[in-house]
Image: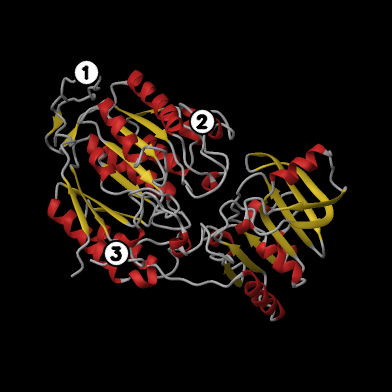
């Protein structure tokens, strides 16, 4: 039997089964709205529950260029959301929770000031400690003003990286715990790419993680979190948790849940949940481009006051992941020249349209695949999209208008791994605002080809996202996308693109499956399979 890390947590942060006991008298702790228990149903009689809701989500690529992420980078996409603005517009994780909570009719929600998202998304590097403190500090201040509360719901990601704060989400839970005290349950929803070890569960009472990539179930995990939190607040569920950490690390391109073995891992988690009422099983597949100590694969289990069951599930899941580790952590993809050649052959056979996915290009400015397409004289290309802020600036400074001729270089801004800039000549089809950016442009070039220029990394996942500026996807033969798995939502799982090639990088750079090319400072790669990690 493989011996992996198994952490059992029986926190003192549990509610009394009847919620009839008042919390401690420590200063600053809120007193929940507790009434007498309904002995017939084990439910606490409440006029209503008050729940604080907050969101702070970032998938941080600590190896990406561009410098540390500052407060102002989180405000480019808009001011902080608070109150109904957050509750009604906070994204799927929040909306799933809010809709279920409203269905109950007895939950009052307090939306704490939360950032919408960071400019550049998952292509942005380390958040500064000051940035983290600024936003979490705002939340904590508003939480204190809102006391007493009966519960806390956090919509997180799990792969945030912050200078000098090794485990940001766990630290966020700890700071909330300091305010609400030991008896108020804290529950969070996460992305399966999160890096979360057992520390988060030392401060929180529940974690709900997406089981599908693409993340079709983000709304569902928010919904489940609301059901769970209300059961805990009502004294009908006593959180008892266990965590296992099979020592396996994988790049996200290998984490598609539409294929084995990841599909089997998630199905095993669902099977446990179906077999054991009250069991919740979550799997973090991890995000290796965050240089943080809790990187890698983690399993979180919650049961209703059954430690033996929680331990057994965590151990079983960890053992299963270890058994399928070779396929889970392995993959090989064609380089740009070969991928384009294979695409040409597929189009000649009538097997189009085709997708070429530059899975590794997190900044979004790499030109290797575009150059290969041009050199092999492929027509009918829609390139969606290339990060090209300097080119956009030039278009706006020259005040080019749709229909004007365009000649210029683009791409290749972030060094050797991005390749050389490519010069294109054509016509400006469209310029305007899109995807939250003030500057987006579409250039028509060559024979039936177009390229979308954006200020920062933009991942296109559906056909609807590119139906603008008169673009009709059916007019193109080849789609070049900066994406790993999310594109499968619109191009693969719909059956739209018969030919799909994940395109590898012509070098050992960050973002590739070759994680040993990374200069980790907070991670010992040899502790993980396939670079070591044997137990």
Q: Earlier in the sequence, mark 2 or mark 3?
A: 2
**129 left or right of 429 in image:** left
Is residue 325 in view? yes
- What whole-number distance in Å separates the C-alpha atoms at marks 2 and 3? 37 Å
Q: Residues within 10 Å of mark 1 (few under 14, many from 20)?
A: few
Numbered tag placed on residue 27 in the rendering: 1
Q: Residue at x 82, y 65 (%)?
A: 447
Q: Residue 479 at what x, y percent from top left? A: 67, 63
Q: Residue at x 69, y 66 (%)?
A: 478
- Given residues 418 and 231, the one toward you in this image is 418
Q: Residue at x 71, y 60 (%)?
A: 382
- Given residues 68 and 444, the one toward you in this image is 68
Discs 2, 1 touching: Cβ within 8 Å: no
Discs 2, 3 touching: Cβ within 8 Å: no
The nearer-to-camera label among 2 and 1 is 2
What residue did someone put label 3 on? 533
Q: Residue at x 17, y 56 (%)?
A: 311
- Given residues 516 and 145, the one toward you in this image is 516
Q: Earlier in the sequence, mark 2 or mark 1?
A: 1
**229 left or right of 66 in image:** left
Placement of 47 over or under 506, stated as above or below? above
- What whole-number distance in Å separates the C-alpha atoms at marks 1 and 3? 45 Å
Circle 2: element type: helix
Placement of 517 over or under 405, stated as above or below? below
Q: Tell me the quarter of the image containing the C terminus.
A: bottom left
Circle 3: element type: loop
Q: Residue 183 at what x, y percent from top left? A: 20, 31
Circle 1: element type: loop
- What whole-number distance in Å separates the C-alpha atoms at marks 2 and 1? 31 Å
Numbered tag placed on residue 71 in the rendering: 2
The nearer-to-camera label among 2 and 3 is 3
């Amino acid at each position: 039997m493989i011996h992996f890390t198994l952490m059992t947590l029986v926190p003192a942060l549990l509610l009394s089964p009847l919620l009839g006991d008042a919390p401690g008298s420590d200063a600053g702790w809120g007193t929940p709205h507790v009434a007498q228990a309904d002995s017939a149903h084990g439910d606490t009689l409440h006029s209503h529950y008050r729940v604080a809701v907050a969101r702070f989500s970032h998938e941080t690529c600590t190896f990406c260029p561009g410098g540390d992420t500052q407060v102002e980078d989180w405000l480019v996409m808009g001011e902080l959301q608070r109150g109904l603005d957050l509750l009604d517009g906070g994204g799927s994780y929040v909306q799933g929770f809010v809709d279920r909570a409203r269905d109950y009719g007895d939950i009052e929600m307090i939306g704490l000031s939360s950032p919408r998202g960071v400019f550049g998304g998952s292509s942005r590097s380390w958040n500064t400690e000051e940035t983290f403190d600024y936003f979490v500090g705002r939340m904590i201040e508003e939480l204190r003003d809102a006391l007493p509360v009966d519960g806390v719901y956090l919509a997180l990601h799990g792969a945030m990286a912050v200078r000098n704060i090794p485990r940001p989400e766990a630290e966020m839970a700890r700071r909330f715990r300091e305010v609400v005290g030991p008896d108020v349950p804290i529950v969070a929803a996460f992305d399966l790419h999160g890096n979360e070890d057992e520390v988060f569960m030392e401060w929180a009472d529940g974690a709900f993680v997406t089981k599908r990539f693409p993340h079709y179930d983000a709304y569902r995990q928010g919904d489940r979190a609301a059901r769970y939190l209300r059961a805990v607040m009502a004294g009908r569920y006593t959180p008892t948790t266990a965590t296992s950490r099979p020592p396996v690390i994988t790049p996200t391109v290998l984490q598609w849940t539409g294929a084995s073995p990841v599909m089997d891992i998630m199905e095993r988690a669902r099977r446990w949940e179906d077999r054991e009422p009250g069991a919740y099983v979550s799997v973090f597949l991890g995000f290796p481009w965050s240089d943080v100590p809790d990187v890698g694969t983690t399993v979180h289990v919650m049961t209703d006051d059954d430690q033996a069951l929680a331990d057994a599930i965590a151990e079983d899941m960890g053992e299963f992941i270890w058994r399928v580790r070779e396929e889970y952590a392995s993959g090989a993809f064609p380089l740009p020249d070969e991928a384009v050649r294979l695409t040409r052959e597929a189009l000649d056979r009538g097997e189009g349209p085709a997708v070429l996915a530059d899975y590794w290009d997190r900044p979004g400015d790499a030109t290797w695949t575009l150059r290969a397409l041009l050199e092999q004289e492929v027509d009918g290309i829609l390139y969606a999209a290339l990060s090209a802020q300097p080119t956009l600036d030039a278009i706006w400074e020259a005040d080019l208008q749709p229909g004007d001729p365009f000649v210029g270089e683009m791409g290749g801004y972030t060094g050797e791994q991005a390749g050389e800039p490519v010069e294109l000549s054509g016509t400006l089809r469209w310029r305007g605002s899109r995807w939250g950016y003030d500057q987006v442009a579409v250039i028509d070039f060559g024979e039936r080809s177009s390229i979308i220029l954006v200020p920062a990394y933009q991942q296109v996942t559906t056909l609807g996202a590119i139906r603008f500026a008169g673009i009709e996807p059916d007019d193109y033969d080849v789609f070049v996308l900066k994406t790993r798995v999310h594109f499968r939502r619109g191009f693969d799982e719909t059956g739209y693109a018969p030919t799909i090639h994940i395109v590898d990088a012509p070098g050992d750079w960050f973002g590739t499956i070759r994680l040993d090319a990374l200069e980790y400072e907070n991670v010992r790669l040899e502790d993980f399979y396939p670079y070591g990690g044997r137990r």
